[in-house]
């Protein structure tokens, strides 16, 4: 049983892309989440990964935000996220061990979809769990329909 309205887990690649470009689909998704057009679902480990990646020096050079601005963004993001506790782990399911926590957040959170730029990483496992895997552009189209 999936949740209604739409609940999506956003892969870290989507969060990173959202901060790198204000004009892309990833950024548009965050704006729609802020307007409550859909809900973001994340586990504490996944949120900590968002924080870790966004605060890396090479990422800060790319997105151009200060540590304070990243922390402010993360606080705003945390305020709209539905937290998910991980009750069951199904490891290994995907080729990249770093992707396991994203998949587990989606499964445990009963998300409608996992949104990522790396569909091929998640596709085989998503089939096993009857989970949709969408690009940010596909998620935007689904939200608009």
Image: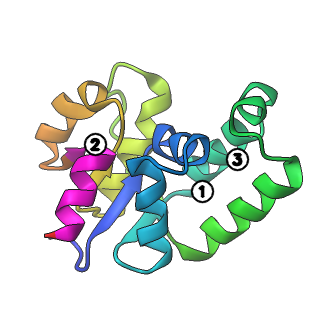
The image quarter in which residue 135 lies? top left
Q: Residue at x 52, y 40 (%)?
A: 17
Label 1 or label 2, whichever lies nearer to me, is: 2
* Foreground disc of the pair 2, 3: 2
Residue to which mark 2 is pinned: 135
Q: Is residue 32 magenta?
A: no
Q: Main secondary structure of the magenta part?
A: helix
How is the structure coloured here?
Answer: rainbow
Q: Is residue 13 left or right of residue 74?
A: left
The magenta span reads: 133-144
**Of the image marks 1 and 3, the number of the one nearer the N terminus:** 1
Between 140 and 131, the one lying in front of the other is 140
Residue 51 tag number:
3
Q: Earlier in the sequence, mark 2 or mark 3?
A: 3
- Within 10 Å of disc 3 (Cα), the crowding (few <14, some 14-19, many 20+) is some
- The answer to whether residue 10 is left or right of residue 144 is right
Q: Secondary structure at mark 2?
A: loop
Q: CA distance from mark 1 to mark 2?
A: 23 Å
As helix, strand or loop, the secondary structure at mark 3 comes to helix
> Quadrant of residue 61 in the image?
top right
Q: CA distance from mark 1 to mark 3?
A: 11 Å
Q: Quadrant of the N terminus?
A: bottom left
User: Residue 59: image x %, image y %?
Assistant: 71, 31
Circle 1: element type: helix
As displayed, is residue 69 above or below residue 66?
A: below
Image coordinates for residue 66, horizontal then vertical, percent: 86, 47
Q: Residue furthest top?
A: 95
Contact check, label 2 and label 3, Cβ < 8 Å: no
Q: Position of residue 80 (x, y in %)?
A: 55, 75
Please give the residue where the numbered disc 1 appears in the rendered image.
44
- Which of pointers 1 and 2 lies earlier in the amino acid sequence? 1
């Amino acid at each position: 049983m999936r949740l209604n309205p739409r609940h999506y887990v956003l892969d870290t690649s989507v969060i990173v892309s959202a901060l790198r470009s204000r004009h892309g689909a990833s950024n548009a998704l965050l704006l729609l989440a802020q307007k409550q057009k859909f809900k973001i679902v994340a586990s504490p480990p996944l949120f900590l990964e968002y924080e870790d990646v966004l605060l890396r020096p090479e990422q800060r050079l790319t997105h151009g935000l200060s540590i304070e601005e990243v922390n402010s963004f993360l606080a705003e993001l945390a305020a709209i996220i539905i937290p998910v506790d991980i009750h069951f782990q199904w490891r290994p399911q995907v080729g990249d061990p770093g992707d396991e926590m994203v998949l587990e957040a989606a499964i445990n959170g009963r998300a409608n979809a996992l949104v990522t730029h790396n569909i091929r990483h998640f596709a085989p496992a998503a089939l096993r769990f009857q989970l949709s895997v969408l690009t940010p552009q596909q998620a935007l189209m689904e939200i608009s329909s």
